Amino acid sequence: MKAEIIGIGTELLMGELTDTNSAWIASRLPALGIQLQWVSIVGDDLPMLTEAFKSGMKRSDIIFTTGGLGPTQDDLTREAIAAAFGETPTVQPEVVEDLERYFAARGTPMPQHNIKQANLIPSARFVPNRNGTAPGWWAERDGKIIICMPGPPSENHSMWQEQIEPQLAELIEDEVTITRNIKTMGMSEGAVDEVISEFFGVENPYLGIYSKADGIHLRVIARAKSSESARAMIAPVELAIHDRLGEYVWGYDDETPEQAAGKSLLAKGLSLAVMETCTGGALTNSITNVPESISYFKGGLVAYDGAALRAIGVPAAVLDNHGVVSQQTANAMAEAVRRNLNADLGVGLSGVTGPGELEGKPLGLAYISVTNGKRSREMEMRLPPRQVTIKRRVPNQALIELRRLIEEIS
Amino acid sequence: MKAEIIGIGTELLMGELTDTNSAWIASRLPALGIQLQWVSIVGDDLPMLTEAFKSGMKRSDIIFTTGGLGPTQDDLTREAIAAAFGETPTVQPEVVEDLERYFAARGTPMPQHNIKQANLIPSARFVPNRNGTAPGWWAERDGKIIICMPGPPSENHSMWQEQIEPQLAELIEDEVTITRNIKTMGMSEGAVDEVISEFFGVENPYLGIYSKADGIHLRVIARAKSSESARAMIAPVELAIHDRLGEYVWGYDDETPEQAAGKSLLAKGLSLAVMETCTGGALTNSITNVPESISYFKGGLVAYDGAALRAIGVPAAVLDNHGVVSQQTANAMAEAVRRNLNADLGVGLSGVTGPGELEGKPLGLAYISVTNGKRSREMEMRLPPRQVTIKRRVPNQALIELRRLIEEIS
């Protein structure tokens, strides 16, 4: 089954907003046995959009669209499909009622413009949107399918996961593709590549290697008639990766470092508190991205000056003797926050906040400490002097060290 | 001058590699007076690529391509243009010599495959590549221009900056495009749309409306012979937006809420400290994304249980009388963190952390408090019950309230 994606919105052509939905949807198609062959980004322009639908329907079986479903005059996805199909949209009263309820729940009357979102053509049906006012469309004509989703990624992804993917899976009984993603941290891309080199260059199962902010990822992709056969093709590759890289593996598939650490904390019934400087809250923020963190996370303290560090429990003597940027201060931060917030485990991240040097130490230098009060893991990191890199890499490494400490003490 | 971009490469359709070149190039076109109207991503497939060039040449004056210039059998950009133009490529001996020199400098003989990169058609000329083996192409036929650049972003961007952009600027003594982005918070998209509806549907200056996590953005785009004329076309629309929506406007152009608030803090020489519950560090993390925050930000405290709230300075009496999720607790948090971290201004964010209810209050309910110890701003928010929305919207609103308080007290 051949597919294409049309990303809709003039803002996507202005270079200010990047179309991330297309890559996200693209990554979900192989497992469904759908082959993506074209992506277009088109502005809010009726003749262009109509052209995009017409040429897409000639070469593809299924077209996914994102965006252009809002209430304004710019939102033309529905109109373009109606034009491409030669059909006339009419307002569906039951959807108007849904919209009125949506606004009433927010204590405000529905703007008249929103009625547009209740329009439908005979060849289409609505796809409910739990997270916004714009319902999706599922249109079928002459053996071709057009599926329209909203543009905001949160609405887009939830509609995909809850509605679109399950309905597509029922529709398609073709080849399946199974992907296994194995995540490592601590070896360079070149070193990983050498250790498992004989698996590269094979078409099926295919092995890919990717360098990411949370380490080196190895992705094994197998295509077969059934999930079982595809999994059987993956198994020997995965086994070899474990044999040779086992100690560096920290997670699988979509797992993030904060999820992997959270899983270990939950499994052992341990609680956590953290204190950061140079990462400015990035560690705390990623820990709390895991909904289950409410059961194991006590809190996070972010200090952006020495006085604040002392105010939140780091002994002045440590700061005076070793400086803010030191392994000793990271250790003191981990222990102080563990005690003050009454947690089993504490993490301390100390480093140069930027923009320039601090205490004669360069931007990019950071110290990690993880402790349960008895046993600790320490690490020094030297990263490129860019805050965005520091805020991404140091928390990831700290969470992986945390997971390793939990394994050591269990 | 109307343009389109074709991103070339099957890997871009697999969802593993995102096409970042297109958005990068897109952001550089308005200042050149080039209007981007279409982006396509196409795999390494000769008939598809030829189709992309043919339909692109029908609707656009200029086509930019990225990728497909390498030495392998998959690299088909040159072949597709030759097919679309009906011309035959021939090997250019002087480029073969360049390639041989490139490899010799790296101490290795040129692989035979690379000869392919010396192919040229009569309607094209080479664009030198300082950073790799693949030269670009600049092809012109029937008044249309096709410009081919390599796919790796470092090669792509340097070729653009050093070769393509200067040559385009000479070519085009046409129009300039000026964009003005006005950011509001506090009115719904539909309501904003209604208030300024007479400006929509005009082609030049064009007014677009976009719903974002930090409110409703209005973008005015004007094309004219000079920057001055373009600005003069924007002025009356901007004035009308200010007249009708002024109190909701919080920023302009690329400004984020944390930058807008940071600018106000810096201008007034005020310092800031924050305390959060339901947003889990998202506010602290976005404040520290602004490098200048080191001069005004003292620190952030994130409490994920009541004990932690008390430990970091919220009076037990307030928690007992009003609950964790209340305006009173948000106020106490703002004041406690302001005092404890010795800052001029304090922000408190209290709300339901999820996953379910807290104190019988629903996920999505949050309270904001901003104070300088004498004067405060308070706000209750009711959001959809999703953590990702809460973590994005509540900090944005708090930063906008902070900016409003600074204006009030100055």
Image (tube, coloured by chain):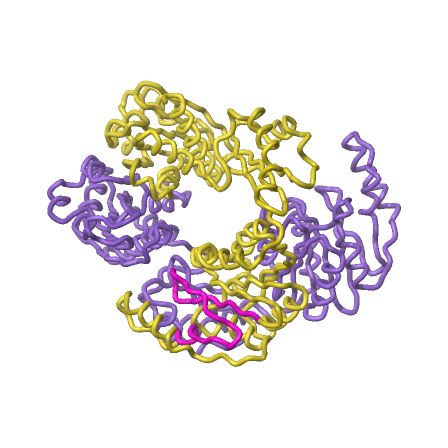
Chain colours: A yellow, B purple
The residue depicted at 85 percent of the width and 61 percent of the height is B87
Q: Residue A343: image x %, image y %? A: 27, 30
**Side of B291 relative to A335 (left or right):** right
Q: Residue B262: image x %, image y %? A: 35, 49
**Residue A41: within the magenta?**
no
Image quadrant where residue B31 sits? bottom right
**Side of B323 relative to A223 (left or right):** left
**Residue A128: within the magenta?**
yes
The residue depicted at 30 percent of the width and 53 percent of the height is B398
Q: Considering only vertical position in the picture, is B206 above or below A298?
A: below
Q: Residue A139: image x %, image y %? A: 53, 69
Q: Residue A315: image x %, image y %? A: 26, 24
Observer-nearest of A111 and B184: A111
Q: Considering only vertical position in the picture, is B205 above or below B315?
A: below
How many discs mark residues in the rendered view?
A: 0
Magenta residues?
A114-140
**Side of A264 relative to B124 (left or right):** left
Q: Quadrant of the N terminus of chain B?
A: bottom right
Observer-nearest of A326 and B90: B90
Q: Considering only vertical position in the picture, is B179 above or below B165?
A: below
Q: Is residue B1 visible?
A: no
Image quadrant where residue B198 sits? bottom left
Q: Is residue B386 visible?
A: yes
Q: Quadrant of the C terminus of chain B?
A: bottom left
The residue depicted at 59 percent of the width and 72 percent of the height is A141
The residue depicted at 81 percent of the width and 64 percent of the height is B85
